Amino acid sequence: IGRFADQLKVDEETMQCALKNKEGSPRSGGADENSAKGENRPRLRARVAASEASEIERENQAARRRYNLRKSRIKVQEDHIRAIVTQESYRAMIRRSQKTFDEMLSTFMDELLREATHGEYHSHLSNLCTRLDFNAFYKT
């Protein structure tokens, strides 16, 4: 135990000497440097705040650029779609599609009604016909 205690005592003395040397040297952060650090802290905080503010401003400018690019892209797409939709050929295509759909649905409803009267599932098919054509729009 004595050897162990002597070893610790040597280590403590070495540490204390190192601390005294560190406090005494001008580079080591003695009292003069601590006071200088205290004076520089407001400047450092101001630089950090300015840096953060400029970073936020750069992010805001980038967001504005993205917004403006998106807005102009949407405007170009809107103009393109508007030009297509206002053409007479587009209107004619929609009318043809609507006419074809109405004819096919009417044919389908007629076949369902015919099957409903002659087939074995007539109650289910008539119920389906009633649900599909609830206001008799396609019967006529």
Image (cartoon, helix red, strand yellow):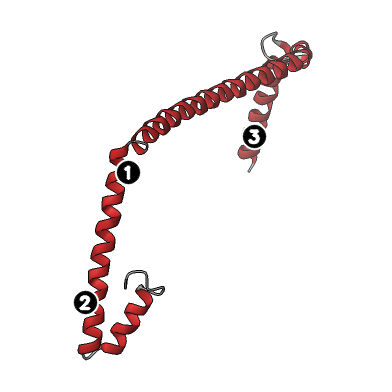
Q: Quadrant of the N terminus?
A: top right
Asked if labels 1 and 2 touch by Cβ distance under 8 angstroms, the answer is: no
Q: CA distance from mark 2 to mark 3?
A: 104 Å
Q: Nearer the viewer, residue 103 or 31?
A: 103
Q: CA distance from mark 2 to mark 1?
A: 31 Å
- Residue highlighted by disc 2: 111
- Residue highlighted by disc 1: 91
Asked whether, in this view, residue 61 is left or right of residue 75, the answer is right
- Please report the residue visible at 42 percent of the width from the left and 33 percent of the height from the top: 78
Q: Which comes sooner in the sequence, label 2 or label 1?
A: 1
* Residue 14's disc number: none
Mark 1 packing: few (<14 Cα in 10 Å), some, or many (20+)?
few
Q: Where does the image place residue 94, in percent across and percent down from the top left?
A: 31, 48
Q: Nearer the viewer, residue 69 or 22?
A: 69
Mark 2 packing: few (<14 Cα in 10 Å), some, or many (20+)?
few
- Please report the residue visible at 67 percent of the width from the left and 32 percent of the height from the top: 9
- Please report the residue visible at 22 percent of the width from the left and 70 percent of the height from the top: 107
- Residue highlighted by disc 3: 8
